[in-house]
Image: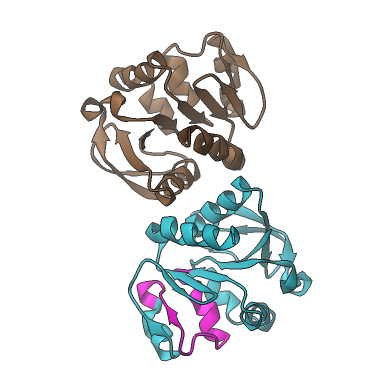
Chain colours: A cyan, B brown
Amino acid sequence: MKVLIMTADNFEDSELLVPYYRFKEESIQVDVVSLKTGKITGKHGYEVAVDKTFDEVNADDYDLLLLPGGKAPAELRKERSALEIVRHFFAGNKPVAAICHGPQILISAGLLHGRRATCYKAVAAEMKGAGAEYEDRELIVDGNLVTSRQPSDIPVFMKEIMKILRG
Amino acid sequence: MKVLIMTADNFEDSELLVPYYRFKEESIQVDVVSLKTGKITGKHGYEVAVDKTFDEVNADDYDLLLLPGGKAPAELRKERSALEIVRHFFAGNKPVAAICHGPQILISAGLLHGRRATCYKAVAAEMKGAGAEYEDRELIVDGNLVTSRQPSDIPVFMKEIMKILRG
């Protein structure tokens, strides 16, 4: 079992750290993929080691993709190689879990048209503009896509993710 | 199932937030007890609502006590009512889980003499001075007492706590 976390500097710390430690509690392998190797730093100052750059990732190696929020998605959505990885997960109907600003990456990848999803309230307008059926709910599961709004939704978000990983 | 988290301002954010969300994922009730009601703020800026003050807590209502680290324990160890709650857990042989600087509260409560335990490296000298059998390991379980050293130990710390709560 292996999870890929796609993020960058200025990630929302709790939206990365809580899942990161949760996966490790279950002995699930986790790789953090970002723009460069070394360390990235969250909005609240936590540092996380990057395991791979986008070019080094083979999406087929992973069972689930996690997109935390913060300001990181605004950077990642400009990266063609990041968008290609996300599209690969969708093409294979593999689970993608995005929270807060994380769905911005899915919007830029053109993957939300006609899909039910949620996100941080400041992202709602552009999510609707991308053709998604936006709802203001703590968790929305639509096929392979799992979305939540904010840190306080983490418990239900993680409960769903763990259910998916347990098969 | 109900857990008590004892902390104060300048808690180590990840050592409170990761367990907090983990318990909620499992629908385990969590109360945060502190010096005053309202909100407390972690070292990294996360705010958490306080549910009860020390005088409002009945230790018998809880199945496990969690002591996160940060600078909070240095304040709490001076509070007689906080130490009484901790002693009540030990007297009933009920689970107490402390991480990082959290064990400072147990030291001040006089509960570590002859007990196997670990803590953040800067706390090791005073832990030994309190008569504990200190070891530099990610997790030590000694009867009702569960201790870990730092945020990177959270996965094994939480795995043990969840095992205890599942009975």
Vertical order, B31 against B24 (above or below): above
Point out the image quarter for the N terminus of chain A.
bottom right
| Highlighted magenta segment, given as a residue range | A99-122
x, y percentage for residue B38?
A: 24, 43
- A115 in magenta: yes
Which quadrant of the view contains residue A63? bottom right
Q: Quadrant of the C terminus of chain A?
A: bottom right
Q: Residue at x 26, y 27 (%)?
A: B54
Position above or below: A162 against B151: below
Q: Is residue B113 magenta?
A: no
Task: Identify which residue, B112 or A77, lies in the foreground.
Answer: B112
How many marks overall? 0
Task: Look at 33% across and 74% down and name the residue there.
Answer: A136
| Residue A35 in view | yes
Please tell me which residue lies in front, B6 or A157: A157
Q: Is residue B41 left or right of residue A96?
A: left
- In the image, is residue A41 above or below residue B26? below
Q: Residue A65: image x %, image y %?
A: 61, 68
Q: Position of residue B94 (x, y in %)?
A: 42, 22
Q: Nearer the viewer, residue A164 or A122?
A: A164
Q: Residue at x 49, y 58 (%)?
A: A158
Q: Going by the picture, which residue comes out furthest to the right? A: A56
How far across and how far down the image is residue B57, in percent? 25, 28
